[in-house]
Image (tube, rainbow, N blue to C red):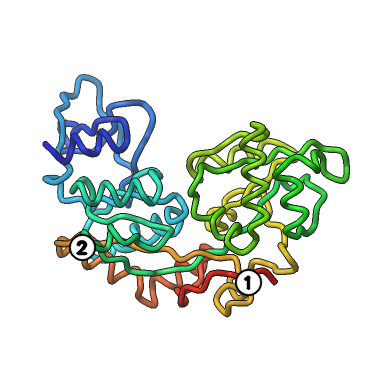
Amino acid sequence: MARAAGLRRLLGRPFVRVAAGLGLALAAAAATVTASLAGPTPPPPPPGASVRPVDPADDGVLDLAGSGTNLPGIRRLARRFAAETGIPVRVHASVGSSGGVAALLDGVIDLALASRPLRGGERAAGLRAVAYAVTPVVVAVHTDVPARSLDAAGLAALLDGSRPTWSDGTPVVFVLREPGDSSVAVMTRAHPELARAIERARARGLHRVAVHDADVWPILESMPGAAAIVAEGDLGRHPDVRAVPFEGHRPTVAAVATGRYPYRKRLFVVLPPRPTPAARRFAAYVTTPTARAVLREEGYAPPIPARPPTAP
């Protein structure tokens, strides 16, 4: 039951196994779904069904958790992998790269999903990262925003409030991320003035802050004038949001794959020191030609050597 307790701490809700006439189905103890099982969604428990806690270590499911940037592509790969191998995969809601790595070190999950390279202490602990994709980092805006391109100076002005409205007078609603966000770090490494603008914005309390990727998209979709720095992987699922060319670069998959679009980050599956055979198999699967074809459909490019972008 130690692993079940760890998952409860990770996701905030316990898992239960539902005893019913047709067999066992996984369900959440609360109304909000916090994790998804690759494959068809299990039916709701029938009235009067008895429930008991389930230890995911015993249920034969491969548990994955980590950065929200990884989730759109990994969910599709998990479904394909489960269909091809018969090994079910449960992809949990975003807990961030560091949250996933910590859960992996605690033995709570089988594989972590990271949108940054491993740090020295994580490598020293025996973790191993497998790069499987690259995603563009973009400035995303609500479709009503009139801007058709941005440069670093213009983005800094939006961030620090010196440009409070768009050209049509709509107020700028910028969504900041928590300190250390890997997408923001890509932009600030290339353009240090953006880091200074973000510091000024935080000091003045100018903008709302989103903790996870999933928190950003509803704001971008629903608020005219909204903008944020995000990884592009989930953009195709949000028709009311678009990416703005930045510093003269358009973020296409081809441009990322060839290095012409310099604002990008690598995505990783992270293995524990002693991975299970199923975990090893999934980590190998995400680098196959089949997986890369699926990822390309989702807007991800194949992994390329890490080179931090430099200001054009």
Is residue 40 among what the camera can see? no
**Nearer to me, 312 or 57:** 312
Counting from the top left corner in percent of width and height, residue 144 is at 78, 45
**Residue drawn at (23%, 34%), measured in percent from left and top?**
15
Question: Compared with residue 203, is residue 106 higher up or lower down, i.e. above or below?
Answer: below
Classify residue 177 by image quadrant: top right
Badge 2 element: loop
Across and down, in percent, residue 259 comes to 58, 77
Task: Name the side, left or right, on which 134 lies relative to 285.
Answer: right
Label 1 crowding class (10 Å Cα cut-off): few <14, some 14-19, many 20+?
many
Q: Is residue 230 left or right of residue 77?
A: right
Q: Name the residue under label 2.
A: 126
- Please, is residue 38 above or below residue 31 in the view? below
Give the residue displayed 82% in from the left and 40% down from the top. 165
Quadrant (top left/top right/bottom left/bottom right) for the N terminus: top left
For the C terminus, give its image quadrant: bottom right
284 versus 51 height, above or below: below
- Where residue 161 appears, as percent x and y from the top left, is 75, 39
Q: What element carries label 1?
A: loop
Q: Residue 261 carries which label?
A: 1
Q: Residue at x 15, y 31 (%)?
A: 53
Q: In which quarter of the image is residue 192?
A: bottom right
Give the residue type that dot 1 points to.
Answer: Tyr
**Which callout, 2 or 1, points at the residue further toward the start of the chain?**
2
The answer to whether 189 appears left or right of 212 in the picture is right
Q: What residue type is labelled 2?
A: Gly
- The spot of residue 222 in percent (x, y) is 66, 36
The one nearer the camera, 265 or 141, is: 265
